[in-house]
Image: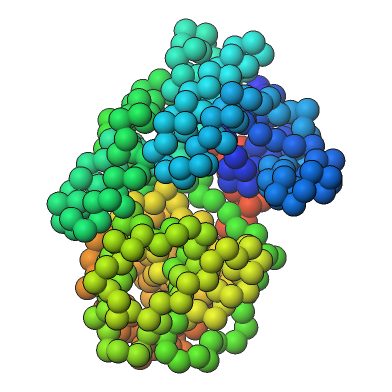
Amino acid sequence: MPPSAVICFAGPRDRYQSALALQENHALEAMVTEAYFSKFWATTGLCGKNFHRFAKVRHHADIPATKAVRSYGAFVQTLQARFNRRKDSPHFAIADRLLSEKAGQVALARRAPLIAYSYYADAAFRIMDGSGLPRVLFQVHPNGKHLRELFQKEIKKVPEAKASLMEETEMSPLFAHNDETYAMADAVICASSFTKHSLADAGSKVPAHVVGYGVDLDLFSARTVAPTANPLTVGFVGALSQRKGARYLLGAMAALPKGVAKLMLYTRTSVDRDLIRGFESVDVEIRGGLSDAELAADMKRCDLVVLPSIAEGFGLVILEAMACGVPVLCTTSTGGADFIVHRQNGLLIAPGSAAAIQQELDWALTHRSELFQIGQAARVEAEKHTWAAYRRNFFAAYVASTQA
């Protein structure tokens, strides 16, 4: 058996599946995080609805609270960051450092390997330098240097998107220290080949394991009948940002004949009005604040879901839509490129092109029955990507990383 590991991340990252992969293999030494609650606090309503909602998502029935080591300093800084809601908040940077320091200290004290998610690795890896303990980096998003260069090119190409892209974490010097954390790692785990390639492009030479995420097949259950509504219903899930190709999608929608397509925007954030300026002709319905169960039910009304990201660490919505039997149009700069075959179980295009999106939407308009069959094939593919499969693959990658 490999040694038990400390794992470090903030929030309910990846629905705690990585920590669970260790726990169910008796290899979880500790989970360092900013907030985690016992079953009592996750189920009681004594402190009001808001606290209950917060505590409920920061608990997993199969990970005992005794395994959690909390950084209260990181928690306070994270709370302060919630007031300005910017990804590049200095409070997030401080919280990341405090959490990372705690993880490094715990790993040293317990003489355990550390698996640190990318924002929380730098300080911990430095603390552990020379200890001989394995340091495994989980690269959440593509490498920061790689992203920054990509975003700078995008700003020159689409000046209207500058404000949207400048809010990305990787554009802030406060987070630049994460760019070369891979150089201190003994191995890297990432969720997509795109992320792996970004690390290689930045200069990483250490072993890198691609472990694609999973999906809850019961929550995101398959539809059995095709949507009947006209016009063509195009879904988009998440924050409407240029990193996710917002202006390319809007440009493609605007170029279609009036009235033939409608954009369903599922989001829990406000819409950047500067980003959508000039596309007032696009028929948009905003569906905000839906729970996962509500999203899964509503998304089945869509003919397809589009995620035309210029850079994505994975893109969970891809598998969630596919599990619902809804075909996905995504770019090769997402995790979808690892398992989508164009016009067989999805639609796959190069990033950064409104014309490429429009071409696929034009095709969809005249092939709606075929589009439904692609969605059925998408469900079959999604069934290969359960969270149980993710946990098996994650643990295997951890074992390989400690033997490297």
What colouring does the structure picture have?
A: rainbow
Q: Quadrant of residue 145?
A: top left
Front-lying residue, 358 or 3: 358
**Left or right: 135 in relation to 69:** left
The answer to whether any part of residue 352 appears in the image is: yes
Front-lying residue, 149 or 251: 251
Number of marks: 0
Q: Quadrant of residue 257?
A: bottom left
Q: Position of residue 295 (x, y in %)?
A: 59, 68
Front-lying residue, 249 or 277: 277
Tell me the residue at 33%/79% (across/down): 282
Q: Quadrant of residue 263?
A: bottom left
- Residue 375 vs 8, above or below: the answer is below
Q: Position of residue 104 (x, y in %)?
A: 55, 17
Tell me the residue at 25%/47% (across/down): 151
- Residue 199 vs 377, above or below: the answer is above
Farthest residue toward the top?
Answer: 130
Q: Position of residue 55 (x, y in %)?
A: 72, 43
Tell me the residue at 45%/59% (across/down): 270
Which of the image's four quarters has the N terminus?
A: top right
The answer to whether any part of residue 402 appears in the image is: no
Tell me the residue at 63%/25% (across/down): 72
- Residue 379 vs 16, above or below: the answer is below
Q: Position of residue 90 (x, y in %)?
A: 42, 31
